[in-house]
Image (tube, grey):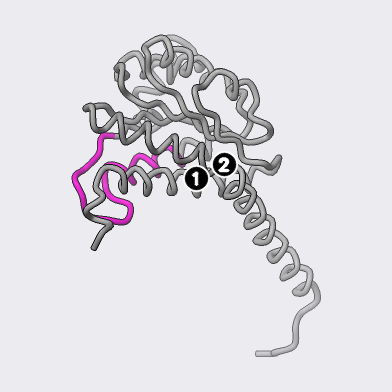
């Protein structure tokens, strides 16, 4: 096998370095500017769990996958063995989504599930790179009508959702990939701090 670089290898390496550097840069900006808001999100979630509430998560496309990923961090574990924490990814049940979409329209798929599962004292987390998805906007409105605290993980300036939620965590990027990478980083930070607030004894060893 030849050890000489092939034509185009250097361009690929340069591109990969640029991608990783930009991803790191965006996260450094979040660390500098958004840490207090991320801590607030974790405190709200911990308070919901202390009072017997739950976390509801939803988004479209890649953000739907993120909702399921984050829910699993609560129901399973993130960094410590501890009691399961109730979290529902509203994206996960295809029968729910297709039945509601068919009968009520795609814009109602999450608001109807908020109506079904949401209770005062819960926390609802909307995930969107644009902040303008109509089905997320209707879901957030339904959650707030039910006195459920709302958090959004956003990008591209926040879109319409930024002004519709109680707490908007806006990734400072217009690049979908960088926004999605940062959403998972933010969610992991929120989950870890929520664990710390709920189970401090597990972090003292």
Camera-nearest residue between 96 and 156: 156
Q: Which mark is residue 34?
A: 2
Report x, y in % for residue 90. Answer: 38, 28
**Is disc 2 surrounded by few (<14), some (14 to 19) or many (20+) residues within 10 Å?**
some
| Disc 1 residue crowd, few under 14, some 14–19, many 20+, Cα 10 Å | many
Per the image, label 1 sits on a secondary structure element best described as helix
Instruction: Nearest to the eye among marks 2 and 1: give it.
Output: 2
Residue ID for mark 1: 186
Residue extending furthest toward the left? 83
Q: Pick the residue in front: 36 or 155.
A: 36
User: Magenta span has 181?
Assistant: no
Q: Which residues, given as a range, are shown in magenta?
A: 66-86
In the rendered image, the vertical position of residue 45 relative to residue 96, given as above or below: below
Give the tally of numbered discs: 2
Residue 146 placement: quadrant:
top left
Q: Nearer the viewer, residue 201 or 123?
A: 201
Gap between marks 2 and 1 measured at Cα: 10 Å
**Rendered image quadrant of residue 176:** top right
Looking at the picture, how far across and down is residue 184, in whole percent? 49, 47
Q: Quadrant of the C terminus?
A: bottom left
Marks 1 and 2: in contact by CB < 8 Å? yes
Residue 111 in percent (x, y) is at 42, 16
Q: On the picture, is 172 further left or further right than 142?
A: right
Residue 85 pos. (x, y %): 25, 39
Q: Quick one: SS at disc 2? A: loop
**Residue at x 45% of width, y 24% of height:** 150
Q: Quadrant of the N terminus?
A: bottom right
First in sequence: mark 2 vs mark 1: 2
Q: Is residue 172 above or below residue 202?
A: above
């Amino acid at each position: 096998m030849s050890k000489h670089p092939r034509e185009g290898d250097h361009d690929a390496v340069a591109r990969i370095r640029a991608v990783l550097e930009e991803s790191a840069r965006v996260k450094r900006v979040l660390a500098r500017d958004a840490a207090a808001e991320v801590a607030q999100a974790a405190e709200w979630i911990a308070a919901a769990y202390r009072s017997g509430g739950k976390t509801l998560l939803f988004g479209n496309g890649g953000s739907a996958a993120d909702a399921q990923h984050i829910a699993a961090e609560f129901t399973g574990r993130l960094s410590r063995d501890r009691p399961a924490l109730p979290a529902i990814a509203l994206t996960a049940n295809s029968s729910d989504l297709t039945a509601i979409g068919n009968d009520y329209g795609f814009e109602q798929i999450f608001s109807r599930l908020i109506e079904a599962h949401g209770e005062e004292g819960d926390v609802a987390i909307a995930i969107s790179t644009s902040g303008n998805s109509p089905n997320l906007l209707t879901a957030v409105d339904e959650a707030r009508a039910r006195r459920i605290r709302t958090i959004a993980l956003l990008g591209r300036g926040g879109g319409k959702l930024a002004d519709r939620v109680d707490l908007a965590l806006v990734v400072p990027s217009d690049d979908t990939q960088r926004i999605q990478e940062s959403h998972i980083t933010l969610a992991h930070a929120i989950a870890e701090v929520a664990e710390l607030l709920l189970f401090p004894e597990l972090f003292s060893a």
